[in-house]
Structure formats: structure tokens, C-alpha cells
Amino acid sequence: MLRYLTAGESHGPQLTAIIEGVPAGLKVSAGAINRDLGRRQCGYGRGGRMLIEKDQVNILSGVRWGETLGSPVTLAVVNRDWENWESRMSPDPACYDESIRVTRPRPGHADLTGALKYNQRDVRNILERSSARETAVRVAVGAVAKALLAEFGISICGFVTELGGIKAKRPDLPNAELAARLAESELFTCDPDADIAMKKHIDLMKQNGDSVGGVVEVNVSGVPAGLGSYVQWDRKLDARLAMALVSIQAIKGVEFGTGFAAAATPGSQVHDEIVYDTAASTFKRTTNRAGGIEGGMSNGEDIVVRAAMKPIPTLYKPLRTVDIDSKSVIEATVERSDVCAVPAAAVVAEAVVAIEIANAFLEKFGGDSIAEIRRNYESYMAYLKGF
Ligand code: EPS
């Protein structure tokens, strides 16, 4: 089983992740992890923090000479901004400074509810951990998961399908071609006309001191039928993917395949008919409205999942809030922020989907080394052809 923990605050020394369950013999490249970290920092509408950070991974355990050992893999992403926060975020009580206590919680963030839950009189003690900064190290974990999946021909591509209500055309292309096109777009879409409209909208939102959300899609190709299970609620692959996606900061909705549209469509136009591809000795669907998952299991078609991201809660034209000390109505605090982080969310969504698919893959074909997993995987794939 693949499991991981992250730790670290947005303005602390670093973000850290420990991954348990990575099989031995997996090729792990810091360069590949750094490419994903760099992609997460991009996107039109990102804020000032992205000018400070150049996120790179430090691999601190579980990897030797480019290959995993089977022991826990520890990844760290240093916060360059830490040098500006050493006193304000110091563990040393002598650094306490009453004058910088934050008492005006931002509507839409974890600030107020976190302060109530953890009995904190300074909402910075909440926002530092609830910040989307944490997603940087989750992207690093996701890159390790993507490397595992790539060993077995499974590819993952995340992109933006809507931003501020503006929809982007989504060409029906293989992931490799999709990824090449997306790399040309500052909004991580495959629709240059939509990019122009989206950038104008982001500029308008910035002028208005506002923020903007959108919809990201992740497409997973090459997943064999049979990952996940219908036999128990917490083994359903779509349930796990939905939890992983909603765990990303600002994500408020998830759908698979045609998703919510299916609720208004007759069953005869929703369910994917089944055919048999004799040449490939495999069952196929004539359509993929289910988004590659039926009964909580991968069905062998591409897994297609979308996530809805709310606009970032920090507004440079702040909404009203209540000061937690005086209880007086006041404008919410303004923390440095992005106007739009939807493209970044596409990279984070790719990562968390990769982790869940890798986890389900190891549940099905688990072994202690890549070689052993490959034997299990190839035996299963041969069995499917002969079914
Ligand atoms: C982010 C880092 C944060 C924010 C942003 C995204 O850095 P800082 O708080 O120093 O500006 O810019 O986080 C949010 C907008 C949020 O509301 O959590 C990052 O690394 O993605």
C-alpha cells in the first residue's frame, strides 16, 4: 500500500513528505520531480510568491543512485521565503511578537473555523498550514507515483477545461500530444482562443481586486481493468479519487466522465455499450461516458475526472469579516496571493490522481520490487487476453 504524510507551513523552513510503500528498483529522477514542481509554479495569474520560489526537491531517504530501496522515501521542498520569515515563524518563544497577530479571518479560507477548532487567537497559526503552498510537496509525491505508473504504460495528463466560466475546447488526443500542446499554453489549455479570453478575464479580476476559479480535468490512459473494487465502500476507486481531489485546497466538486450531465440524460444515452476487440483480445466500450470507472473499478478505458476549484479566498478588495478579539465588523486580512491558480491546480490534480492510481495498482499487483510487480502485472494481462 502506498501512503504518505506531508508536513510544513507556507513560510516555515521547508515542506516535507514521507512516502511509505514505494517498491525497490523504481527509477526516481530529481529532474522529473523538479519539472512537475516547476509546472505547478506556472500559470497566468500566479502571485508574488512564485517570483521568490524556484521549487526543487531534496531526496533525503529511500533512493540510492537513482533507484528506490524499498524503504520510506523522504522528499523536501525548501521555502526560499523562509529567510524573510525566520523570526515571525520561529519555534523560539523569544521571537513572539503580539503586533503581528492576525485577527481578521478571510471568508472562504480555513482561518476562522481553524482558530475555533484549535483554540488559536492568531489565525496565522491556521493559514500557514492550510495554505495551498502545501501542494508543492504533494506534487513531488505525485511525480514518484507517476514514475511507477509509467513503468507499466500508464500516463496521466492534467489540464484546464474552464476558467472564470470560459470553456476551453478539449481535443480528443492521446496524453502525450495533449501534454505537448498544454506546454504551449499559459493557462494549460489546448485552446488558444480560450487562453486569450481567460487572460483578459484574469486581468479584469485583478483590476477589481477579485479572484477566479475554474475546472481542471485529469485523463489517465493505460489503466488495466480491475483496479479498485465494488465489494467495500472504501475500496471503490472513484471514491478514493474523489477524496484525493477534494483534499486539494479550494476544490469544491468532482465528477467522472459526463458526471453531473448524466443526471439529466436517459440511461440509453449514458451507459457505454460493450464490444469485443478480437484483434486485441480485449473488451472495449463504444463510448466512455463513465470516465473509465464502473462499479468502483477501472474498466480499461481512460479514467476521466474533473474537479471544480473555487476562486482563491484572499481578495485584494477584501470581503467583510469579524475581528476575533473585538467582534467588530471589519475588512478581512489581505495575505499575498494569486488572482488565479487554476493551472497550478491541474498539476496538483495530476499528482493526487497518480498517487491514488498507484496505490490501487500496488494493491492489485503489489510486490516489494518493480521486477516482482512486473511479473504479477504481466501474468494478469495475459490472463485478461485469455478470458
Ligand atoms: C502558494 C503559496 C502561497 C500563496 C498561495 C499559493 O504563498 P504566500 O502565502 O507566501 O503568497 O501565494 O496560497 C494561496 C493563495 C492560499 O490561499 O493558500 C503556492 O505555493 O502555491
Image (tube, grey):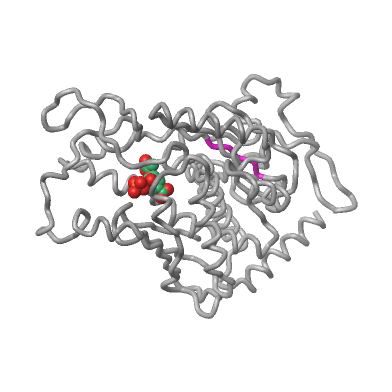
Please tell me which residue is depicted at 68% across the width and 37% down the height of the picture.
Answer: 191
The picture places residue 152, in percent across and down from the top left corner, at 68, 62
Query: Residue 365, located in which quarter of the rendered image?
Result: bottom right
Please tell me which residue is depicted at 65% across the width and 35% down the height of the picture.
Answer: 257
Would you say the magenta stretch is mainly helix, strand or loop? strand
* Residue 132 seen in the current view: no
Give above or below for 264 relative to 26: above
Q: Residue furthest bottom?
A: 65
Number of numbered callouts drawn: 0
Name the residue nearer the viewer: 243 or 74: 74
Please tell me which residue is depicted at 74% across the width and 48% down the height of the picture.
Answer: 174
Give above or below for 44 relative to 85: above
Name the residue nearer the viewer: 234 or 142: 142
Query: Residue 346, located in which quarter of the rendered image?
Result: top right
The picture places residue 300, in percent across and down from the top left corner, at 72, 48
The picture places residue 270, in percent across and down from the top left corner, at 71, 27
The picture places residue 63, in percent across and down from the top left corner, at 49, 75
* Residue 330 seen in the current view: yes
> Is residue 344 one of those drawn in magenta?
no
> Is residue 304 one of those drawn in magenta?
yes
Q: Is residue 339 left or right of residue 28?
A: left
Q: Is residue 210 left or right of residue 335?
A: right
- Residue stretch rendered in magenta on the structure: 303-307
